[in-house]
Amino acid sequence: MNITIIGSGYVGLVTGACLAELGNNVFCLDVDQRKIDILNNGEVPIYEPGLKEIIQRNRAAGRLQFSTDVAASVAHGDVQFIAVGTPPDEDGSADLQYVVAAARNIGRHMTGYKVIVDKSTVPVGTGEKVHAAIAAVLQERPDAGASFTVVSNPEFLKEGAAVDDFMRPDRIVIGVDDDEAGRQAKELMRELYAPLNRNHERVLYMDVRSAEFTKYAANAMLATRISFMNEMANLADRLQVDIEHVRKGIGSDPRIGFSFLYSGTGYGGSCFPKDVQALVRTAAEYGQDLQILGAVEAVNDRQKAILVEKIVARLGQDLSGRHFALWGLAFKPNTDDMRAAPSRVIIRALLERGASVTAYDPISMEEAQRVIALDLEDLAPAQRRIRYAEQAMDALDGADALVIATEWKQFKSPDFAALKDALSQPLIFDGRNLYEPAAMRKLGIEYLAVGRA
């Protein structure tokens, strides 16, 4: 099948590459010439395990191409996926300008029948806006002979495991209207996803608005579990309770399960923060106050500073002359995504209190340096006391303490003897609960984690 992906960011790139891997002919469009040049030179502008190899293999096979040519992209695909960004607006609502612009471009160039698929995470009612935008443009082209159906097909991809999530999905949600045009689109989508349904049916069909809402509700539930567990962890610290025992105790209940019950420094990334905000904003437009999600967001904002609170409680408000090693910059392992990463909050807070920081991350160093430089532009040059190490152990030299912000695998079993020798004092502030407190005590390391009293 001929497929067009509009937007070659995280979702669009993974979707396009994986659909090409399934044997489709995929045309990936983006307005960013620099990004297209990177892709056409065999490189990938984001880090996602396994993605680069799939892209290179399918480019070589002629099933995957990248371009900025809008007319060619519309002509290519029987199915047009809109996978552009939906960043939060000033009021927290999803900014749909790029989605609507993509829809209008399709309308300007399309002929014949097209299935228009909203792959971006969008508020309820966006399918209707996309339909209206295309229809308005087609009214100006009465001789185009074009018709179309709008479908919602939200993504459920975890950064760091996106390729596997796409190729082995637990569900595929397709929202399509139950009319003649909708049934035609449904058959095309069924054919497209048939290779992923051979073992058992994974597709859930529903109306467009329900599909749009499903994505937001799913992310809101996961964010709620994280914030709930972080509140329990903070209380556990006060009650001298080990939150790991509690996690195992409640997670063993099949009605609860273990997923997303790890306490730490809060969630980040491109999805949970903006999707919770957008859902709260959507509810407000309909006169409803989502009190639980408001609390989820407030808890997460506070949680990003939890390690700083522990550092201040142990070392004092004035950290002048103190030096910290920081392990982990990306918001989670197996990605270079720095969006809403807790490390950014931690670094700024330490620098503002007079400390200096040496940071290390296995993957996100280049992106982190770019983002953090922007974060610190308003600080005086003398306050921008941050540098970056080439290796994890190099960051420790002479540091007063180690701060852990991301749970990369390579941080889980370090050489603790060397770690202890490198630090000026054996002190770890762990925002991801990587180590056992009893084991750290035996090693003579003071260990302050989240909820591990």
Image (cartoon, rainbow, N blue to C red):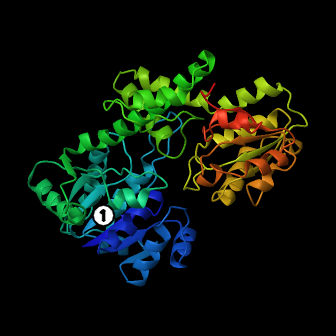
Viewer-closest of 411 and 147:
411
Q: Quadrant of residue 444?
A: top right
Q: Residue at x 50, y 41 (%)?
A: 88
Asked whether, in this view, residue 333 is left or right of residue 110, the answer is: right
- Residue at disc 1, secondary structure: strand
Residue 300 in view (yes/no): yes
Report the residue at 40% width, 23% height from top.
290
The residue at the far front in this view is 442
Q: Quadrant of the C terminus?
A: top right
Tell me which residue sits at (82%, 25%) in the image. 317
Residue farthest toward the left in the current orientation of the protein: 180
The x and y percentages for residue 155 are 35, 52
Q: How many marks?
A: 1
Residue 284 picture location, percent across and down: 40, 25
Q: Nearer the viewer, residue 47 or 131?
A: 47
| Res 114 visible | no
Q: Quadrant of the N terminus?
A: bottom left
Question: Residue 148 location, x and y as percent?
Answer: 20, 60
The amino acid sitting under disc 1 is Gln
| Quadrant in the picture for residue 145 | bottom left
Q: Which residue is mark 1?
A: 80
